[in-house]
Image (tube, rainbow, N blue to C red):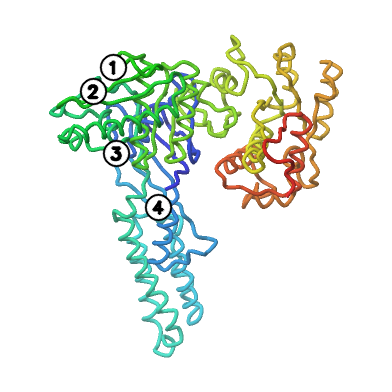
Amino acid sequence: MKLLWAQIKNFRSIKDSGRIYFNPNLTILAGKNESGKSNILKALDCFSKDKFDKDNDFPIDYIEEYPEVVVHYELEEETIDYICDNFNLDKDSPSISKGVTLIRTAIYKEVIEVELYRDTIENVAVAIGTAISAINKEFKSKFKPNIEAITSNNLEEVIEEIKSCFINIKSNLNNEQLNKIQSIIDEIDSYIVSLTDFLSFINSDELKKTIPNFIYFSSFEDIIPNSISSDEEITPIVDRFFKVVNQDPDVLFEEANPQRRRFLTDKISAEISGDFMGYYSQDNIELKINLDGDELNFFVYGTDGQKPFQPRQRSQGLQWFLSFYLTLQAEMKTGSVLLIDEPGLYLHAAAQEDLLNMLNKLATSSPIVISTHSHWLMDPERLERIRLVLKNNDRTYVENKIHKGADNNTMKPILSAIGLGLKNNISTFGKNVILVEGYSDYYYLEAMRYYFSEMHEYKLDNFKIYPCLGSAQIINVLTLIIDSETDYYILLDNDKAGRQTEKKLITECGIDNSKILFTPAKSKAYSAIEGVFSEEDFNEIVLESLEKTKFDKVLVSKKFNERIHNKGITVLSDETVSNFKEIFDATGLLQISQIESISR
C-alpha cells in the first residue's frame, strides 16, 4: 500500500482541508498552535476506526454537514497482478491504474472506488460498441456507461445495465448476424463474468487488507515500570517491549531452569540495548532485565556499567524517549501509518535531533505522519516533507507548498530549520550557505546534493541552501548574515532579472562578484535552474508525463527531490551531472569522498 493523499471535510475546525499529499516515508504537518494540526491526525484516526463522535468530531456550527474523510492510495504490485490475472485485465497495459479511493463519513455507507475496474468497464463498452457497429449502427448510442460516476456502491447496477443492453442487442439480431459477431459475444460474456467477480472482490477481506490503517498517538505517558509480576496484567508499553524483543512473557515467566532464565534475559537485554543506542546519543546507557522469581525487573545502567537505576529514577526525557522508541518499533511491525501528535515536546535540542534520526530510519519501513512546530524536527535538506497547516476565519486547511499562504509565525520554525531565526537569533546559517532565488532552486540543488553523495560518493554536507523567495529578497537576507562568520555564495538565474540583481549586489551592497554565481542554463527550451538539466532529462525524467507547457515549477522540483531521495531516479545524463557539478565546483564545497571524478 502506498498512501498518496487524504482530504478531510466538516471535521471539528476543518471545513475542507484540501488534498493533503503524503511523503512516502515521513510527512510533517507544520503550523503554529491552534492551527488545527491535531485535528488532521484525529480525523485520520476516525477514518481507521470508521467512527465519528457527534459531540467532539462534528463541526460546532453544523446543520446538515457531516464529517467526511477521503483517503487515496495505490495497490501493491502483487495485488495488481492478482486482479489482472483473475479479472481479465492486461497488467502490461500503459493505462493500468493502481489507485483506490475510499470515502468514510459519519452517516453514510463507505464508498470504495478501485480504478482498475474502470478499465474492464471501458473494455466492455468498446466490445459492445464494436458489436453494434458491425451489425446495427442505430443501437450505438444506447449503451454509454458513465465511467466517472461508477463506485463500489453502484457497480452492481452498472453490471445489470450491461447485461440488459447485451440482451437487447442479441434479441434484435438474427442467427446469421449472431454468428458473425460470436467472438465479440464471447468476449462480452467474459467481461460480464469478470465484473461480477470483481464486485465480490471489492467487498472481500482481500481488498480490505489493503486499506491504510492509521494509528494515532497523542502522548507517551505510559512508561516502562520498575518491575512487573507474573500475575500482573501486562500494560500496553510492557506488551510493546515484548513485541520488540519478540518474546512471549508467559514463556519467560514459566521457564524454571535458572541457566535458561539467565540466557533469555541476557539475550533480551543485549538486543534491546544495542538497537536503542543506535538512536539515543545523549548518554551511554544499557537497558537490562532481571528475572527474580515471579517478578521481572527493568534496569538502566549508566556509563560505568556498574550502577543499576530503575527506569523511573532516570530523567523524564529518557523515559519518554524509551517509551516512544518501544511504541514505534512495536507498531512498525503491523505495517500501519503512524500518526504522532507533537513528538518530543519535552526533549532538549540534541535529543530532538536523535528523535528525527529515529523517525527517518523507522519511516523507511512504514509511513509516519507527525505534527510539530519544532524546527529541530524539520530536516533542512528535506523541506519537501513539510505541509503547512493554516487557519483562515477559524477554518483549518492544508497548503502543500510551504512558500504559499503562510504568515511569519507559521514560517518561523521552517526558516530556523534551514538556518535562520528571524527573531531572537534562534539559529544560525552555519559555516557555509548558498542563497538561491526560490524553492525550485532549493529542491533541485538538495536533490543533486543527495545524488552526488549517493551515486558518485561526493561529500556535500557542509553547507546549507537557503531559498530567498525571489532575487529581490536576496539583498534583505544578506543584511542578516553579511557581518557574521558565515561564508556565502549567491546563485542567480542567468537572465535579465538575475543580471540586474547582480548589479545591485555589487554597487549597493559591495558584494564581491566572485561570490555571485549564475545557473549554467544551457537549454534553449527552459530558463533558470530548469535549464541546468539536459533537455532530454528534463522532459523525460523531471517532467515525466506532465504537460511541458503547464506545470507548477515548485511542485515539479519538489517531486523530483522526493523521487531522488527515494531512489526513484538513479541515473542522469553526463550533461546534467556536469552542469550541476559546475555550480557546486564554483563554490569550492564539492569534496571528493572516494573517487576521483564523476565521468562515466
Please report whichever mark, 2 or 1, sits nearer to the chain's N-terminal start. 2
| Element marked by disc 1 | loop
Query: Which residue position is annotated with label 3?
Result: 246
Distance of mark 2 from mark 1, alpha carbons? 8 Å
Return the x and y of residue 585 as percentages of the image width and height: 77, 33
Q: Nearer the viewer, mark 2 or mark 3?
A: 2
Amino acid tagged 2: Asn
Amino acid tagged 4: Glu
Image height of 50 relative to 540, above or below: above
Distance of mark 2 from mark 3, alpha carbons? 18 Å
Amino acid tagged 3: Asn
| Element marked by disc 2 | strand
Verify CB contact (< 8 Å) between mark 2 and mark 4.
no
Q: Nearer the viewer, mark 2 or mark 4?
A: 2
Please report whichever mark, 4 or 1, sits nearer to the chain's N-terminal start. 4
Residue lying at 63% horizontally and 51% vertically, measured from the top left: 544
Query: Which residue position is annotated with label 2?
Result: 297
- Left or right of 108? Residue 281 is right
Verify CB contact (< 8 Å) between mark 2 and mark 3.
no
Foreground of the two, 192 or 353: 353
Return the x and y of residue 110 as percentages of the image width and height: 32, 47
Please report whichever mark, 1 or 3, sits nearer to the chain's N-terminal start. 3
Query: Which residue position is annotated with label 1?
Result: 310
- Left or right of 227? Residue 124 is right
Distance of mark 2 from mark 4, alpha carbons? 51 Å
